[in-house]
Amino acid sequence: MIISHTYKLIFLKTSKTAGTSIEIALSQYCGPEDIITPISPADEAFRRELGFRTAQNFVVPYKQYSLQNWISALRLGRRLQFHNHIAARDVRMLIGRRIWDDYFKFCFERNPWDRFISMYYWRCRQEPRPSISAFMDSGALDIMKQKGFGIYTIDGRIAVDKVYRYEDREDALEDIRSRVGLPEKLRLPKAKGGFRTDKRPYRDILTPAEIERIARKFSQEISLFGYHS
C-alpha cells in the first residue's frame, strides 16, 4: 500500500487486482516522507531498475504513536508498521482520523470468479495442482474475502472514497490522476504475470457448483459492483 502526503492519497492493496503494478506505478511520484510498503524482492528490484522509490517509512515512529497505538503495540509485542495488504481500519488507526478523512482513499475490486482463478494459479504454481474444489475447501475463499472486502470496509461498510473495478482500470487510472493532480498518466508495468497457464474464461474452468459457491461467498461484492456470472 502507499500513502502519499505529496498528493494526499492512500492506496489500499487488495489481492489479485493488479495491486503490485499500481504500487510500482504510484511509487514514482512518492516523496521522501511518503509511505511505501515492501513488496517481493523481485518486484522491489524491478521498481529499483525503473528508478522509482522502493519500500520506505513503513515502520511507524514512536513519536507518532497515539495512546491506541501504544496499546496495540504492547498487545502485539512489536513495533507497529504498515504492510502490503493492510486493512482500512488499521491504516486509519495508524495515521489518525485527520489524515484519513482528508486524503483520497481508493482501491480496486475484481470479478470474483476471475479473481479466484487468478488466485488459484498464483498460489498453486507447482504441478500437480490440487483440484479447484479442494483449493476452495482449504480456506481460499475466506482468504480472498479478507484480502478484498475485508481491506476496504470497516464494520461491513465501505470505508474508502472510491472502489474502482479492475476491469475498468484504464479509466480508473486516469480518474485517479485527475483527482489527485499527478503530473502524468499512470502507466502500469507488468508485475506478477505469467502464473495463470490456463487462459480460458473462468466459465469454462469452473463447474456450475463452483460458480454458485463463489457467488454465495461474494454476494456483497457482486451486488455492489454489478458483477454477474
Image (tube, rainbow, N blue to C red):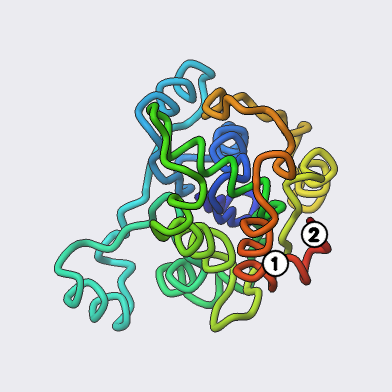
Q: Quick one: label 1, few (<14), some, or many (20+) residues within 10 Å?
A: some
The image shows residue 193, relative to residue 6, as above or below, that is above
Q: Please tell me which residue is depicted at 56% across the width and 56% down the height of the picture.
A: 12
Residue at disc 1, secondary structure: helix
**CA gap, disc 1 and disc 2:** 8 Å
Locate residue 174, reporting x and y percent: 82, 42
Mark 1 touches mark 2? (CB < 8 Å): yes
Q: Which quarter of the rendering shows the C terminus?
A: bottom right
Question: Which label sits on residue 209?
Answer: none
**Residue to which mark 2 is pinned:** 227
Of residues 217 and 194, which is closer to you in this image? 217
Q: Please tell me which residue is depicted at 26% across the width and 76% down the height of the picture.
A: 72
Of residues 115 and 64, which is closer to you in this image? 115
The image shows residue 149, relative to residue 35, as above or below, that is below
Amino acid carrying mark 2 in the image? Tyr
Question: Which label sits on residue 221?
Answer: 1
Q: How many marks?
A: 2
Q: Please tell me which residue is depicted at 72% across the width and 39% down the height of the picture.
A: 204
Locate residue 104, reporting x and y percent: 68, 61
> In the figure, residue 169 lies in which quadrant?
top right
Residue at disc 2, secondary structure: loop
Drawn side of residue 192 relative to residue 114, left or right: left
Drawn side of residue 110 relative to residue 194, left or right: right
Locate residue 213, reporting x and y percent: 61, 64
Q: Please tell me which residue is depicted at 51% across the width and 60% down the height of the picture.
A: 141
